[in-house]
Amino acid sequence: MKYGFLGTGKMTSAIIAGMNLSGYNSDDIFGFNKGDEKIDKLVDDYGIGKCGSQGELIASSDVLFLAVKPSVLDEIIDEVKSNLTNNDILIVSIAVGKTLSYFENHLGKNCKVVRVMPNINSTALASTSGYCFNNNVSSDNIKVIEDVFGSIGTIEHVNEDLFSIFSAIAGSSPAFTYMYIDALSAAAIKGGMPKAQALKIAASTVKGSAIALLSSDKHPCTLIDDVCSPNGTTIEGVSSLKKNCFEDIISEGIEAILKKDKAIKEGSAN
């Protein structure tokens, strides 16, 4: 099976890195990018094939990854359609806000399309990816998707009507988490701890907390109670965060993401 990547940015690089570590043959992986620098680096690092045009890439692929920004996808989607000669090709989109119906409208009702939303943690092979697909996609096709994206972390089927919220809490929230880690380390630095040590401890603690939650059947609130002793130090910090609307701020951030996602779908994003 041949895998073609249209667009060779950070996410493509992460996916190919995961595929490489999982034993995929580099001779079966191809890429095309308008600029040479990114694709040439992938060729040097992993030995993938470099295509000279979009048409050559599509003709070489059994699975086509559309790994470009939504605005760029709008510019090239009709050209993609004109290059599609293999009706059995599996189209995989990682573009935010582009629905299954978007692809069916542009590429034809018989196209086989899977939407996948990985996140930036794919660069550490720790992505949380979600996927949905149209009625033309087979169980064998799904196995292909789960294997590829399983090479960069975990992947879970999510109904398309929940895809926007998945994208918000899994695709965008790592930025929130980085902000939280930075804030923790900044507070530690203010207290006198060296910066490098503060960052390492903050990040490690966040990682450990996530692992503890995933390995437990407890609700997060129960785990919060487990940390907080009566009249202790932690409850003072939790009370301060609640007083300053910590949870409401996170909720408002997710709502802002969903608003932008809706604008992208409707073509009214600035």
Image: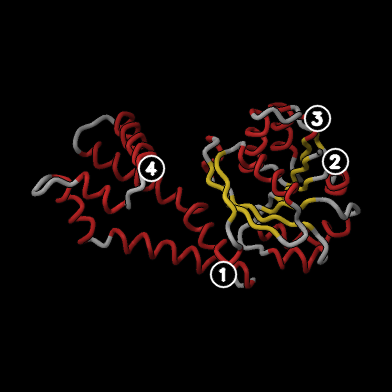
Residue type at numbered disc 1? Lys
Q: Which mark is residue 262?
A: 1
The amino acid beneath tag 2 is Gly
Element marked by disc 3: helix
1 or 4: mark nearer the eye: 4
Q: Where is the C terminus found, in terms of image quarters? A: bottom right
Of label 1 and label 4, which has the lower sequence position? 4
Q: What's the distance in space between the residues labelled 1 and 2, CA to CA? A: 35 Å
Residue 144 in the figure: left or right of residue 199: right
Q: Which residue is mark 2?
A: 52
Task: Give whichever of discs 3 and 1 has the lower sequence position.
Answer: 3
Tell me: 27 left or right of 66: right
State which tag comes first along the sequence, 2 or 3. 3
Mark 4 lies on residue = 210
Mark 3 belongs to which amino acid?
Answer: Asp
Sequence-earlier tag: 3 or 4: 3
The Cα atoms of the two marked residues, 2 and 3, are separated by 16 Å
Comparing labels 3 and 1, the label whose residue is closer to the camera:
3
> Distance between the Cα atoms at labels 1 and 4?
29 Å
Q: Could you say whether the residue bearing mark 1 is in a helix, strand or loop?
A: helix
Residue type at tag 4: Ala
